[in-house]
Image (cartoon, rainbow, N blue to C red):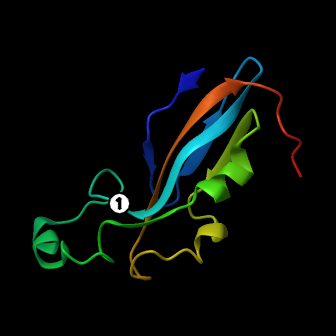
Amino acid sequence: MRCEDVQEYCHYETFDGRCWRGEVVVIQHALWGRMKPGRCLQVPANFLEIHGDDPLFIGCFRDVLPLLDNRCSGRPECNVLISDPSFNDIKPCYADLKMYFEASYQCVRGMHASQS
């Protein structure tokens, strides 16, 4: 079993879960929103001074583990475009702000689920 670290996936990037040698993806963590400044969320210092305490500007997110689990877990590989329409209705932050995705998965030995 191999555990992947939590990774950030910016808007228009793709989450690629990929396992080898009879292993399948098991999603461990999946959030959608604006968790913290980083690679996908570059916020000027003056914006943080003004908006840093606003819970809909930064630190706003929704757990999307069920969505990603449904698409990926039990399969040897999966690809999810971060700008996928499935995320359009999930608005944990102000609607006009760009959000990003953070996820982690493990590869475990097992049979893959049939894709429907």
Q: Position of residue 74 (x, y in %)?
A: 76, 38
Q: Residue at x 77, y 37 (%)?
A: 75
Label 1 residue SS: loop
Q: Position of residue 87 (x, y in %)?
A: 59, 69
Please determine whether, in this image, residue 87 is positioned above or below residue 10. Answer: below
Q: Residue at x 67, y 46 (%)?
A: 79
Q: Position of residue 21 (x, y in %)?
A: 74, 17
Q: Residue at x 87, y 46 (%)?
A: 115
In the rendered image, the quadrant that contains the N terminus is top right
Closer to us: 76 or 61: 61
Q: Is residue 89 left or right of residue 116?
A: left
Closer to us: 52 or 8: 52
Q: Position of residue 104 (x, y in %)?
A: 51, 40
Number of marks in picture = 1
Q: Amino acid at mark 1?
A: Met
| Residue pointed to by mark 1 | 35
Residue sitting at the far top: 21
Please determine whether, in this image, residue 84 is positioned above or below residue 50. Answer: above
Q: Is residue 42 left or right of residue 4?
A: left
Residue sitting at the far bottom: 95
Q: Residue at x 12, y 65 (%)?
A: 45
Circle 1 packing at 10 Å, graded few (<14), some (14-19), many (20+), is many
Q: Is residue 24 left or right of residue 13?
A: right
Quarter location, residue 95: bottom left
Closer to us: 10 or 57: 57
Quarter location, residue 94: bottom left
